[in-house]
Amino acid sequence: MVRDENSTGVPSPYLPAEMNSFKKALSQKKFAAAYHVWKRAIARYGTGDPLERILEVGCGPGNFALCLERWFPGARITALDLEDDLIRFASKRSLSASFVRASSQKIPLISASFDVVSALQVIEHFPCPEEFLAEVGRVLRPGGLLLLSTPNPTGLGARLQGKSWQGIRDDHISLRNPSEWRKSLEVEGFESLSEGTTLFNGMPILGQLPLSIGFQVIQAVAGWFPWSWGESYMVVARRQG
């Protein structure tokens, strides 16, 4: 189901390229492996038994939503994005998720209605991330989980590459280091349960085939690491109160 609100009319740069059926299947397996760390986090820290409702903000072309559908078939999945063409593309791939076109900083959904909210590589796009965290706190039920990832400007890749680091983009307007994100989460009423950074997939050569495959396998098995040198900051936080 798609709920469409207004239209920008501008094609999204996040739409994937055309792929044949084999490449589509391979791509989805790659995403499933990359996202498996979040499945484990939900299983470890989630208190809903079973999970009833999951919200993904900034769903893009729907790769994570597809994984959530398979992993939690009894849950109601809602996916939100601001771009029309991404919502249309993702909804065509989905079997059961609901899709909403809206701003993630003004989520048009009922308060305290979700067990889990995911925001993967999203929060760096907001001019005021605290407004987004407040909205997440509003729609999460007490004790609900936030899954958050964002580029790490203090990682090894950023340090070595400087202005050529891939995390520096015109639409990445709120890049912060892990300690700053930790403070923001605390101020907005979240308790960090597990956090760290990833490996070095964003670096030249290391992030390309075939070396990137090894990193992806390690990431899928081990998750994030207790250091500040990785490409992305990852955190699972619980809404307090």
Image (tube, rainbow, N blue to C red):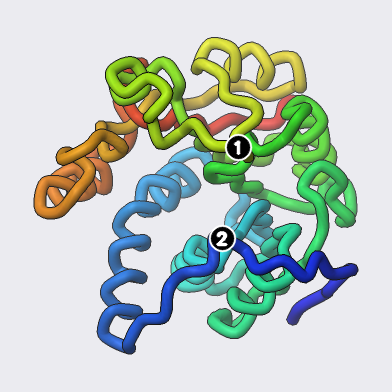
Q: Position of residue 240 (x, y in %)?
A: 73, 26
Nearest to N terminus: mark 2 or mark 1: 2
Q: Position of residue 223 (x, y in %)?
A: 31, 38
Residue 72 appears in view: no
- At 65% from the left edge and 30% from the top edge, which residue is drawn? 173
* Quarter of the figure that contains the C terminus: top right
In the image, what residue type sits under mark 1? Asp
- At 59% from the left edge and 19% from the top edge, which residue is drawn? 181
Q: Is residue 235 left or right of residue 91?
A: left
Q: Quadrant of residue 202?
A: top left
**Vertical comparison of 174 with 121: above or below:** above
Q: CA distance from mark 2 to mark 1?
A: 13 Å
**Vertical comparison of 90 with 151: above or below:** below
Secondary structure at badge 2 equals: loop
In the image, what residue type sits under mark 2? Pro
Crowdedness near tag 2: few (<14), some (14–19) or many (≥20) residues, C-alpha within 10 Å: few
Q: Position of residue 158 (x, y in %)?
A: 37, 22
Secondary structure at badge 1 equals: loop
Q: How many marks?
A: 2
Q: Quadrant of residue 195?
A: top left
* Quarter of the figure that contains the N terminus: bottom right
**Vertical comparison of 12 with 156: above or below:** below
Residue 154 appears in view: yes
Write down the residue under mark 2. 13
- At 64% from the left edge and 53% from the top edge, which residue is drawn? 58
Q: Residue furthest front?
A: 163
Q: Position of residue 152 (x, y in %)?
A: 44, 25
Q: Which mark is residue 170?
A: 1
Q: Quadrant of residue 24?
A: bottom left
Q: Which mark is residue 188?
A: none
Depth check: give the residue in front, 168 or 59. 168
Depth check: give the residue in front, 72 or 130. 130
